[in-house]
Structures are given as structure tokens and as C-alpha cells.
Amino acid sequence: MSATAIPLVPGGHEQTWHRPSRGRVGMYCLIIGECAIFTIFVVAYVFYIGKSLNGPTPAQVLEVPIFNTICLLSSSVTIWLAERAIERGILRTFGLWWAATIALGVTFLIGTGLEWYKLIYHDGLTIRTNLFGTTFYSIVGLHATHVVVGLTMLLLVLLFTLTGHVREEHSERIQVLALYWHFVDAVWVVVFTVVYIVGR
Amino acid sequence: MADQTLPIHGSLDLTPPREGESTWLETLHSWVITVDHKKLGLMYMMLAIFFLLVGGAEVLLIRIQLAVPNNHLISPQVFNRLFTMHGTTMVFLVGMPLVFAWANYIIPLQIGARDMAFPRLNAFSFWLTAFGALLLYFSFLGGAGLYGMGNAPDVTWWAYAPLTARAFSPGNATDYWALALLVTGFGTLGGAINIIATTFSMRCKGMTLMRMPLFTWLLLVDSGLLLVTITPLTAAQVMLLLDRYLGAHFFDTQAGGQAILWMHFFWIFGHPEVYVLVFPAFAIASEVIPVFSRKAIFGYPAMVAAGVGIGFVSLGVWAHHMFTVGMTSAGNAFFVLSTMLVGIPTGIKIFNWVATMWGGKLRFATPMLFSTAFLFQFLAAGLTGIMLSVAPWNWQLHGSYFVIAHFHYVLVGAIVFMVFAGIYYWFPKATGRMMDEKLGKWHFWLFLIGFHVTFDTMHFLGFEGMPRWIYTYPADRGWDHLNLVVSIGGLIQGVAVLIFAYNLVSSLFKGKIAGNDPWDAWTLEWSTASPPPVYNFATDPVVHSRRPLWDIKHPEDPDWKYE
């Protein structure tokens, strides 16, 4: 955050006095805490794989959401391009990549919605059906909740950008927010692996 | 207040304050909307002390019920509610707020900062905790639910499944319990994030990590531990609420769910939680013992390393709460050994505190009395802990009063004692007045006697086979006299706490004026006025060693020459 030169002992030679940005430290802490929450849900999911007393089973009803996954993971690339743009002060490019990130996130959310619609109305799988339903909707729902929270914050920034309130000096805050979005994407890799590859 | 009396010149803004009396409504308003770390610290402290009295009253009712055999003063249902509320209150509404009370008030002052890293998040976290507390206690009114079943939660503070399922706990009591813990949990997470960001990013110039006071270091480790400790509980509460409201089957044994999963999830939170609660006690001891021994802390790097070590080891010991459930022998061996491993870093800490006192010029003011008692009691608690970590011993005694005696030795003998030490030590800083020493000594000795009468005796009740959670017992079991002794000890502690409460209030108005540095201490909080101004320091302090005030008071022999 601040870097000035001070002597560490009186009369000693000057050294740069550097402290990390509080926004980044705070966000990393939040991410560590969130990781613990997801770990517990992942453990529950893995623990209950194959223990449902009745169907439907994952192999019968789950389809691997490849398109969705591509959308979400590429949103990490677009948000990184946006971060780079605002660091260099190119606000127009920033706005475009930021909007692209939101579009990709929304696409992912719609994809999840369609998947759930199919599971509920065609396959008859709800959270009450069996242990698979319980753990599946919880872990995917927990992740989707994080996507919704992330999208809300991204949208706020987009609104501020459109009204001209976001400037180059905000790049630090934008990057802190982007950290959260990267986390949401990274967690999806874990959820995807556990639910659609290991568990199917 | 003249700036000249302060060790650091220019640390106060000398412009005279604006005149103007504020009405009590304005004062109240200023406390409600405040984002100042000192006010929030005091609010956390008041919340904790209030619920300490509430939780204490609950346990006194329990002890009156158990004082004589075949007692029917309290019904079994009420007894269950009382010990559930006692446990939940003491852990979540006393122990946790205390962590944030200390951290909020002291850390920014000790590291030379003007506030926490995120002041508004700080206020938000406090109010979440306060509303969580309200939710928990509202259960007395709202817990009955539509079916008129139940009252306050009665599922114990660890709330084992499947007792918490709708079928076995109808009404809303369990929901209030789960929601209260969920809400206070978010408050805790916010507080922990704030403390870590503050210690990393708000330190004044020259305050390198290895120059931070041990108090700040230990609460930093504590917050790191909280990040990965409170969150599993949050996750488990979400699962429980999904079970209760949406008909999910996480802990539903009828649908293939397993109750043991809840036990694991709960104790993954629950064991590190004990360390979360005891870290502030370590932190206070690491400030009080050096100052009252007139020596720098012995083995500072080892103390830091031991703190971090305890944090890590404590994450891998949770299933020692579950030996009696039955595990594989490999599982038993792992958790026996990992539990015993905790003894090494805690042993280092005790040795270093004792070595700090060794050869020092001891001053037995009230904070030091409590700290000395803490050393002995924490050692004894640790030793019974090692006994209980041995699986076969645990099988014999797990469900007995021996376990209650063990963990209350930690919770009361270590934590509560050090909370009192900390209050006597920092009260002058927060209010500008000293607490009464004579009453303090009465408080100490009565509390010490009451503590030992109660909890030493409980060990023997455990050996004699008295199980936990029973609301009464027949007369011919040989438990009668011991139970009476335990209850009498409880009442003595109650009297001691009342003396303390009186001392607290009367000293607030009539205590001796303290001055800025009544204990001749060495950390930065003593370099500003008592009570500190809103901005803490008018100019940013610069430090050159672990004891900045020592350097200023003794320019001929400063610490930085030796570090």
C-alpha cells in the first residue's frame, strides 16, 4: 500500500517500509474462509457418493455441462483483460471486457437454471428425493449463490463505469473484486470434478 | 492533558475540544453508529460481560438443582435447556465476543494505527454478533413454534444429529439455535478478516512482524485459525437448516444419511474453537507477565513459533472428542498422538512465561495474581487433557464429570482468569481510572477458592462415575457430598463475580485517576492518553524495537541494540 524508506534502527541504513494492501489481505482471508465452507460441502458430497437408497443416480440424469464450464472459465480471462485495461487507464476497453465477463457469468447461471429445470421436471430429482439430490443441489447451489453475489458486485461496477465514476485510480479495488471472481471460477473446477467426473 | 507527560511527543492533538454538552440520546446515538475500534471493542466487552452474567446465572440454577440428590426444583426439560443455553452462551456470546473485544481495543493501539483496516465491516460484525445473540435468546419466547413444542433450545451446544431432526426436535427452538450460530458466525468471520488485514496492513513505521507485541501476534494467529474454524460450522448449520426446512437428508438416518458426519463437522469446528477461545488468554499473559516481572518476555521467537504451532496442530485433533463413538485403531492412534503433540508448543509457552518471571522483580498487583493462578491452572488443565487424549482412559471417563472438570479448568481456570487479568490491566487505559486493588484482591482470592472447590472436586465425581447431562441422581451413589461441595464452590464464584461487577462500576466513577502509563509498561497503547483520543495518535509513531516505550524511557540502554 505505502512504500517509504525508513531506517529500521536509529542511525541504520534506510530500508523500504512496505505493507500489503488491506483490500487484498482481506479478500485473501475471505477466500480462505470460503474454501473451508466448500471443503465441508465437498466432503459431504464425496462421503455420500453411491449411498442413496433410491434413484435417480447421477449416471442416469447428469449431463456434463461443457458449454457452461467453458463460459465460466473464459470469464476469468475476460476479467483479467479488464483488469489489465484499467491498470493502463484504457476505460473503454475495461468496460467492454467487464461487460463480457458479466455476459459469460449470466450465461453460466442460465445454463445451471436449465439444468435444474430438466432435473426437477423431467427426472423428478429434488433436494428431498435422495442423498444425491440433497448433496447435488447443495453444492451446486452454494456455488451458484457465489456466482450471483459476484455478478451483483460486477454489475454495480459496470453501472459505475457507465456513469463515469470508475477511473484509473480504482484499479486496485477492481482487482480485489476480480480476485473474488477468480475464486468463484476456481471453485467451479473443484465442483465440476467432484460432481460431474468423480461422482458420475 | 499536557502533552509533556506522554512518552512520545506530539502524539496528542492539543487543540482544545469543542465545548458542548450532549444529551443522553446523542450519546446513545454516537455509540450505535460508531465505527471507532475502541468503542466497538468496549461494546464487544459489555456484550460478553452481560452474557457472562446470564450464562453464569444459568449454571448456578443447574448447580442448585444438582446440589442434593433427588432434587426436583427444575424439570428435566428445563435442565436440558439450561445446559444447552449455558454452553452456547458461554462459547458464542462470551468467549467469541471477548476475542474481538481485546483485538479491537488493543491491536490498533499496540501497532500504532488509528483504526482497524475496515471500520465499517467492524461495526457490521459487532451488530451481527449482537443480533445473533438476540435470536438465540428470543427462542425463550418464539421457540415454541406453531405446535407449542419446546421453548429454548435443548439439543446441547454440540447438537448431535439426529436429535436435531424435525421429528425429534419439533418447534422452532433448534432453528433459532442454528440461525443464531449462523449469524454470529458471519460476524466472527468479518471480525477475523478485519484483525488479519489490520495486523498486516496497518502497522506503524518500523513495526516489523517480528517486532509486533506478542498479544497482537497471538490474536493474529487466533484470527487465522478462526477463518478455517468458524466456516465449517457455518457450512454444517446450512446443512442442518436445509434438513429442517427443505427436507434434505444430510443427517437423516432414515434416508441413508449418517449422524457421524455431523459429529465430524461439528468437532472440526469445535476443537480448534477451544484454542480460539484460549488464545486471548495466552495473549494477555504475554503482556501482563513481562510487565509485572519487569523483564522482557523470555524467548520471543519461540513464543511466536509455539503460537503458530498450536494453531496448526489444533486443526488435526478433532476426533479425540469421538473416541467413544468407535474408530479404527489407526484413527485412534492418529488422534491420540496428534492430541499429545499439542502438549509440546503449549509446554514451550508455559516454560517461557515461567522463565520470564524467573529472577524478575515481581509485582503482585491484581492482574499478576490472576496470571500466576492461570499458569498453574492451565498446566493442570493441560495434564488432564493429556490423560484424556489416551483413548482407553477416554473410553472410561468420556461421559463423566471428569471431562467437565477438564474443560472447565481450561475455560474458567485459564480463560476467565486471564479475562479478569486483562480487564484489571487495561481498565485504566480504557477509562482513565484504576480499578480498586483491595476489592480486586478480594475478587481474586474468593474466585480462586471457589474455582478450586468446584472444579477440583468435579474430577473426583468423574472418577466415581457420575455421568454428564443427568438432571438428578439417587442418594445412594456416593455423589451427594461432593455435589454439594461443587455447588457451594459455584456460589462462592458467583459472589466473587458480583464483587468484580461492583468494582467495575464503582471504579468507573470513583477510581483513582490512572495517568497514561500506570503500570510502567512498554507497548504503544501506553504512549497515548487514557482514555485514548478518537484518533489514537496525532502523529504516526515510529518504533525501533519490540518495546518502543522502553527505548524512550531508557535512551541510554535501548532494546534495539540487542535485537
Image (spheres, coloured by chain):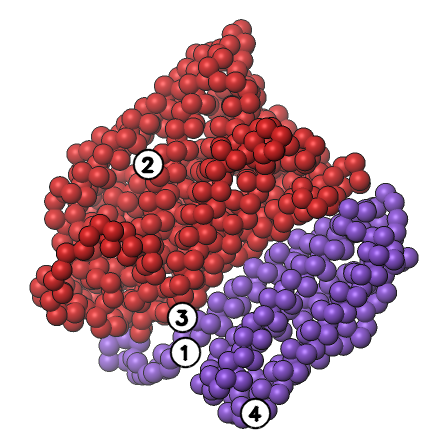
Q: Which residue does the numbered mark 3 point to in the structure image?
A: B201
Q: Which mark is residue A1?
A: 1
**Element at label 1:** loop
Dot 4 alpha-carbon crowd within 10 angstroms: few under 14, some 14 to 19, many 20 or more: some
Residue B376 located left or right of residue B295? right
**Element at label 4:** helix
Q: Which mark is residue A92?
A: 4
Q: Which residue does the numbered mark 2 point to in the structure image?
A: B373
Q: Are marks 3 and 2 in contact (CB under 8 Å)?
A: no
User: Residue A61 location in percent, x, y?
Assistant: 88, 59
Residue drawn at x 48%, y 12% as measured from the top left: B71
- Between the C-alphas of marks 4 and 1, the distance is 27 Å
Of B312 and B528, which appears nearest the observer?
B528
Q: Quadrant of residue B482?
A: top left
Q: Are marks 3 and 1 in contact (CB under 8 Å)?
A: yes
- Label 4 marks a residue whose chain is A
Query: Could you say which chain is coloured purple in the image?
Result: A
Dot 3 alpha-carbon crowd within 10 angstroms: few under 14, some 14 to 19, many 20 or more: many
Q: Which three-letter amino acid code belongs to the residue tagged 2?
A: Ala
Which hue is chain B drawn in? red
- Quadrant for the C terminus of chain B, please: bottom left
Q: Does mark 2 fall on the same chain as mark 3?
A: yes
Q: Which three-letter amino acid code belongs to the residue tagged 1?
A: Met
From this view, report whether residue B499 is shown above or below residue A64: above
Q: Which three-letter amino acid code belongs to the residue tagged 4?
A: Arg
- Label 1 marks a residue whose chain is A
